């Protein structure tokens, strides 16, 4: 959570920013404050326990990689599209071949954009799974995400409604993670999966959902 400054320039803990101000400050500092990149996806929630602070750091690292990849691919795609418009990529006598090489480069960048999205989804869900394992009382670290979650909820006697809500959110992000992983271990690129899962909207929803899950988990361990 961010706060207005007092007369000395220090945070005034009695005057938190409203939601719009939080978002404005976040984007103003996003390029220079990588540690806080997860704040937006955590609804500017302040964690207290060390396990959740470590989780926030891992989520921020995930977002930093995704942002860096998006900036790099956007810059490269803009250059390729400009070459497509002005024809500067063409060699005299080899126009068709030059166009083919350009289109192959565009395809590589498009694949890179999708891979970066999938990697962010995978890393965010991995951070959530590691958080659950760190919160677990069990010494068995080989359990998968579903089993670890169900054991965690059972040990804390969580209500059926809250259990259902958390499991539904975890199932959604887990399904996306698994779909991306299967595209890499099966056929090289599963186009239906890419169109459904590997989109900026899907990535953002995954990051926000992982954030909501972490906040819900914290409420159960306090």
Image: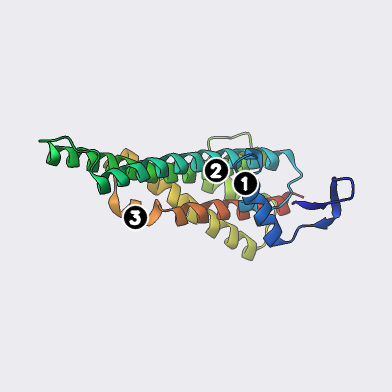
Instruction: Give the numbered dot on residue 63.
Output: 2
Q: Position of residue 125 (x, y in %)?
A: 52, 45
- Between residue 199 and residue 47, name the one nearer to us: 199
Q: Circles 1 and 2: CB distance less than 8 Å?
A: yes
- Between residue 188 and residue 172, name the one nearer to us: 188
Say which quarter of the image contains residue 72.
top left
Q: Which residue is mark 3?
A: 195
View extreme (right): residue: 7
Q: Position of residue 115 (x, y in %)?
A: 39, 42
The numbered mark, 3 or 2, whose residue comes first in the sequence reads 2
Side of 173 relative to 47 (left or right): left
Q: Which residue is mark 1?
A: 38
Say which quarter of the image contains residue 141.
top right
The numbered mark, 1 or 2, whose residue comes first in the sequence reads 1
Side of 222 relative to 91 (left or right): right
Badge 1 density bin: few <14, some 14–19, many ≥20, Cα 10 Å: many
Label 1, label 2: how many angstroms apart (C-alpha)?
A: 7 Å
Say which quarter of the image contains residue 93.
top left
| Residue in the picture at 25% in, 40% down | 88
Q: How is the image coloured?
A: rainbow
Badge 2 density bin: few <14, some 14–19, many ≥20, Cα 10 Å: many
Secondary element type, mark 1: loop
- Give the total of numbered labels: 3
The numbered mark, 3 or 1, whose residue comes first in the sequence reads 1
Instruction: Give the numbered dot on residue 140.
Output: none
Secondary element type, mark 2: helix
Badge 3 density bin: few <14, some 14–19, many ≥20, Cα 10 Å: few
Side of 148 relative to 72 (left or right): right
């Amino acid at each position: 959570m961010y706060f207005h400054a007092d007369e000395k320039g220090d945070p005034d803990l009695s005057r938190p920013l409203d939601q719009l101000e939080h978002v404005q400050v976040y984007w103003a500092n996003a390029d220079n404050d990588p540690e806080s990149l997860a704040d937006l996806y955590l609804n500017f929630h302040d964690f207290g326990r060390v396990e959740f602070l470590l989780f926030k750091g891992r989520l921020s690292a995930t977002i930093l990689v995704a942002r860096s990849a998006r900036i790099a691919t956007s810059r490269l795609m803009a250059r390729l599209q400009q070459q497509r418009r002005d024809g500067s990529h063409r060699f005299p006598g080899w126009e068709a071949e030059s166009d083919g090489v350009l289109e192959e480069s565009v395809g590589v960048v498009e694949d890179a954009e999708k891979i970066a999205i999938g990697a962010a989804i995978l890393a965010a869900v991995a951070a959530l799974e590691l958080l659950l394992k760190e919160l677990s009382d069990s010494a068995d670290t080989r359990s998968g995400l579903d089993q670890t979650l169900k054991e965690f909820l059972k040990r804390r006697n969580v209500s059926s409604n809250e259990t259902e809500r958390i499991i539904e959110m975890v199932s959604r992000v887990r399904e996306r993670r698994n779909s991306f992983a299967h595209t890499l271990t099966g056929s090289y690129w599963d186009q239906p999966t890419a169109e459904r899962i590997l989109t900026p909207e899907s990535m953002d929803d995954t990051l926000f959902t992982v954030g909501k899950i972490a906040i819900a988990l914290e409420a159960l361990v306090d």
